[in-house]
Image (cartoon, rainbow, N blue to C red):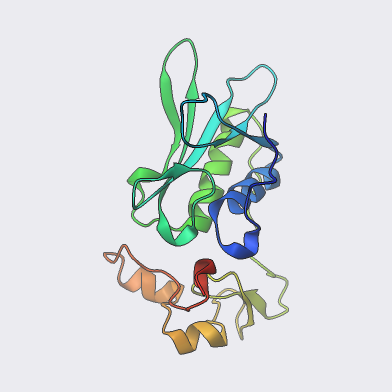
Amino acid sequence: MHSFIKTRPGGEFHMGALLRDALVFQGISVRVDKPFPSLPYEYLVAEREGYTRVWIHAQSCNGTLHYDIPRADLMAVAAVVTDHVSTRFIYDGFGAEEACPVEQAEAMAAAVARHFDVPVREVPEPFATGSGYTHCACRDCMDTTVSSDVTSPDLCDACRVAGCPSLPERATYPESRYWACQREDAYGEA
């Protein structure tokens, strides 16, 4: 068993902290493990007594398999179980239209909760108390902005200047699979 010491902080825009936080939100505890010394990568492992453990990883667009890849490189998140019946996905992000890190992390965590028969907690809309504070409409920078309507977030100033697409623009052009934050500091690359 390994600790989260090698997991990059959430501010560095890697998948490890995002996946961990989504699972913890669902009441699922996880650890980092490398199942075989010959494998070059590590997984997040979720366990609950009486249930088959779940191995969670992310795959980058350059082929890297690891739970803590850069969000900008994300192709898909997967959660897999192996039991006496078979090896199968309980969450398969490879079929997703877009590789949206937050949405895939939340969907994977909900699938793991269902696998463990844990009631799935609905992710609340951020700051939906009428305060006007919302997550940025690009959904990748994770910044907070003030919106005149909390049900329709606005872009933060940095994303507006960088030309990021907002959620309504993504819905208008769903055929584009490569919506991503356009800021130079996005995904820890600056």
The quadrant in which residue 26 appears is top right
The quadrant in which residue 143 appears is bottom right
Q: Residue at x 58, y 48 (%)?
A: 19
Question: In the picture provided, is 167 more to the left or to the right than 54?
Answer: left
Q: Residue at x 56, y 30 (%)?
A: 34
| Residue 139 seen by the camera | no
| Residue 113 seen by the camera | yes
Indicate whether 150 appears above or below 8. below
Name the residue at the top extreme. Answer: 84
Of 166 and 36, the residue lying toward us: 36
Of 29 and 27, the residue lying toward us: 29
Question: In the picture provided, is 40 more to the left or to the right than 124?
Answer: left
Give percent across and percent down for residue 176: 29, 66
Give percent across and percent down for residue 23: 64, 43
Q: Residue at x 41, y 16 (%)?
A: 86
Give percent across and percent down for residue 150: 62, 76
Q: How many labels were placed on the picture?
A: 0
Name the residue at the left extreme. Answer: 175
Which quarter of the rendering shows the N terminus?
top right
Indicate whether 104 appears above or below 174. above
Question: In the picture provided, is 70 more to the left or to the right than 124?
Answer: left
Q: Residue at x 30, y 71 (%)?
A: 173
Of 95 and 189, the residue lying toward us: 189
